[in-house]
Amino acid sequence: MPELLAFITITLLAVISPGPDFAMVSRNSLVHSRSAGVITAVGIGLGVMVHVSYSIFGIGILVRESVHLLGALKLAGAAYLVYLGLRMLLSKAQPKQEMASRPTDSAMAMLRTGFLTNALNPKTCIFVVSLFVQVIEPGAGVGVQLGYGAFIVLAHVAWFSLVAYFFSAASIRSRLMRVRQRIDQVFGVMLVGFGALLGVKGA
């Protein structure tokens, strides 16, 4: 029981802490739609599944302990976040009529964005591996580990779906969409900042 409570507490605190995932879901929910935000949240959950999978099979320890592997992951994640941030910063404001006629990004694009934002995040890698190494008992069976892994994934999807529902609420979205370009600039700066921090640490 103490192990379970510690696991749940640590997971929930880590999930709700602000980061690239939060920025992407918030932005997609505001700029596109509620479904876009939820699909991004599902993509994040798929990214978490990658970290959970190699943690269960023990490869995560190798990633955490290998300076070169972890450094490569940090640089890849940093480059992707900077790329996303620059796209937002360089986006131009468009008239409402043009925005209405312009199709939003596809569901697959939203899913891919959420997946890559999380799968390339070294902080999530270290967090998940540390949970499996330091919190879960070494003798825990595969079924127990899968259950813990499922909780981590579902916690991410549930939280970021709530974020999507909040930021896509009509009252909030109608006000913030008036300053859409400013929103893109704010989230663009955030993502470039996250990427720069990861790049400095990974160098």
Image: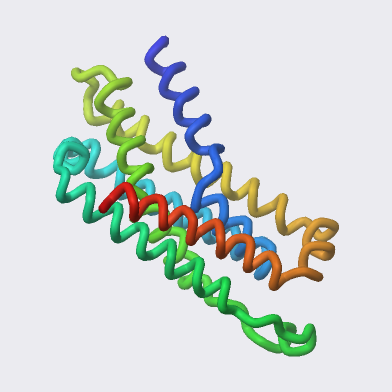
Between residue 43 and residue 197, name the one nearer to us: 197
Would you place residue 50 above or below residue 65 in this image? Answer: below
**Residue drawn 34% across and 52% down?**
200
Q: Is residue 130 left or right of residue 163?
A: left
Q: Is residue 106 left or right of residue 71?
A: right
User: How is the model colour-coded?
Assistant: rainbow
Q: Answer above or below: position of 78 versus 105.
A: above
Residue 1 in the image: state x and y as whole percent: 41, 11
Q: Position of residue 153 (x, y in %)?
A: 43, 42
Residue closest to the eye, 143 or 197: 197
- In the image, 15: left or right of 73? right
Q: Determine whether 136 is above or below 180 in the image.
A: above
How far across and how far down the image is residue 197, in percent?
41, 51
Residue 128 falls in image quadrant: top left
Callout count = 0
Quadrant in which residue 101 is drawn: bottom right
74 w.r.t. 192: above or below: above
Residue occupying the point 32% across, 47% down: 201
Residue 98 is drawn in which quadrant? bottom right
Query: What percent of the width, then of the height, locates residue 22?
Result: 56, 50
Q: Residue at x 26, y 53 (%)?
A: 203
Name the residue at 21% across, 39% down. Answer: 64
